[in-house]
Image (cartoon, grey):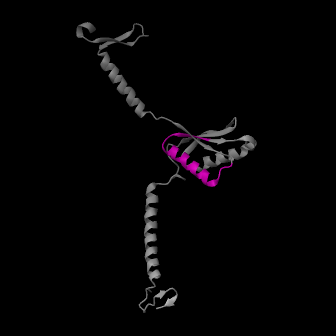
Amino acid sequence: MARTKGLDLIEVSPTAVPPVCRIGDYGRLKYEQSKKDKEARKKQRNWELREVKLRPKIDVHDYEVKAKMAERLLLDGGKVKVTIMFRGREITYTAFGKRLLDRIAKDLENSAIVEREAKLEGKNMFLIMAPRATPLGPPRFVHLKTDTAHHEAETAEHHDEADDHHDESANGVAESGTDAVATIGGASA
């Protein structure tokens, strides 16, 4: 039948008894299948695991930078592995690392859940966090760019007003209606 119609005999299920076949254009079937696979991959969420590395004796500002990076990665939809690296004798103070991982978990609790608790493997202690489906509140470290642009505009306006006021006082001109005396080099003119 397939030869008479000029089509292909396509085996759908070879393991069935009897095997299931259908008549159709094999090239078109492969094309449609690749389109379905591509669409399924597009809808699938890829959980990319990104890593943020810390040291047990991290400074406050460095901690905030790393926490901001982790929060940004979580908001982008990926999982984050926070790793504390111990060197030399620091491994004897694993409690510092545990407290640091607990602190970052607490700081990022609005946008993340702890998927795997802090665990020590070799000279590294790590914690895996996944993004929350619905955040509990606003992000703690990542701020919107519109807020910073608004703040910069206000700062520029305030700076311009201060320059105007500074120019008037530098010329020696008083703002009141009385006669002004300009001073040059400390002597009155």
Q: Does the magenta run of residues contain 177?
A: no
Judging depth in this view, the residue of 84 and 180 nearest the camera is 180
Task: Please determine whether, in this image, residue 118 is positioned above or below residue 167.
Answer: above
Judging depth in this view, the residue of 127 and 137 nearest the camera is 127
Residue 3 in the image, given as x and y percentages of width and height: 26, 7
Residue 66 shows in the view: yes
Report the residue at 43% width, 69% height from top.
157
Q: Name the main secondary structure of what is drawn in magenta.
A: helix
The quadrant holding residue 79 is top right
Report the residue at 43% width, 57% height from top.
146
The quadrant holding residue 17 is top left
Residue 81 in the image, given as x and y percentages of width and height: 59, 39
Query: Quadrant of the image for the N terminus?
Result: top left
Residue 47 in the image, given as x and y percentages of width and height: 50, 36
Report the residue at 66% width, 47% height from top.
100
Judging depth in this view, the residue of 126 and 165 nearest the camera is 165
Judging depth in this view, the residue of 2 and 167 nearest the camera is 167
Q: Does the magenta run of residues contain 59?
A: yes
Residue 118 shows in the view: no
Residue 2 in the image, given as x and y percentages of width and height: 27, 9
Task: Please determine whether, in this image, residue 21 is positioned above or below residue 186.
Answer: above
Decide if residue 53 is on the left or right side of residue 155.
Answer: right
- Give the number of marks: 0
What span is in magenta? 57-82
